[in-house]
Image: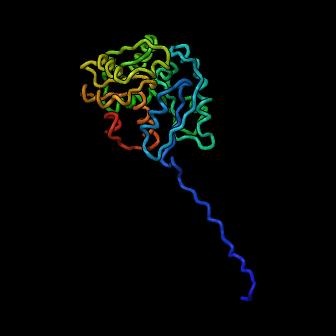
Amino acid sequence: MNSGEVTKPRARSSPEVRFDGGRHHRARLGFVVLAMEQTVESDMFALVPPGVGVHFSRAAMANRIDVATLLEMAEGIGEAAALLLPDRQPDVVCYACTSGSVVIGEERVFAELRRGAPKARATCLISSVMQALRAVGARKVAVATPYLDPVNEIERVYLERNGFEIVNMEGLGIENDADMARLAPDFIAEFARYVDRAEADALFVSCGALRAVEIIDGLEAQLNKPVITSNQAMLWNCLRLAGVHDRMPRHGQLLRDH
């Protein structure tokens, strides 16, 4: 090399772009929740197993849980579902409202979900609950709800038409969803024990707004029977529909054994 000669640096090739399956490589679950919902999202994030994504869209609704307001939100379900991962639709899409599911009806709910997310498997909260009750072998069921009596009656008839015997059903007469989300878990457990009956095969605590997943294990130990709650059943059913069969050590027999 001659003195003063400048050596050019060797050209470096850029690294080849690599992709993997992403954080949600096992499954993507989409949930249509009520506009004022405060519980479902945190429950799903807390319970979902690794590798499964949970995604949410909100449907417009007045902050009053009664027959009229639940019926009015039906068309908004499809519009909300269309916003869930529009470039790559979820594997499963679920309408995350127990009372809305029974008032609107599964057939209409599924039609709206498929309108918004035609490539996803459609389900809803009451469908998930009924599948969960069947999985634990329950036919006679006690049901605790926060709802007004007209909503309770529709839910009772809905469950009975699908083969369940409702041995007792009682509600708290609350119409404001925000108030439902503020019910203390220890009170929910107390109320659920009050509603349960010895002849019931299982106890169902109805409503996605209730903070009920955290009381399941304690109630099952006290009552010696399966306890099904809305959000526990919904996640279990959505996972199974997506082909994810993880067993979870907490939050009841349903997630642990089925």
- Residue 74 drawn above or below residue 8: above
Image quarter where the N terminus lies is bottom right
Residue 13 appears in which quarter of the rendering?
A: bottom right
Is 131 on the left or on the right of 79, as rendered? left
The answer, for residue 165, to whether it is visible in the render is no
Residue lying at 65% horizontally and 66% vertically, measured from the top left: 14
Where residue 67 sits: x, y (%)? 51, 14
Image quarter where the C terminus lies is top left
Residue 252 appears in which quarter of the rendering?
A: top left
Where residue 22 sits: x, y (%)? 53, 50
Residue 190 appears in which quarter of the rendering?
A: top left
Q: Which of 66 and 7 is in front in this view?
A: 7
The answer, for residue 222, to whether it is visible in the render is yes
Where residue 174 sits: x, y (%)? 45, 13
Farthest-out residue, front: 4
Residue lying at 32% horizontally and 28% vertically, measured from the top left: 227
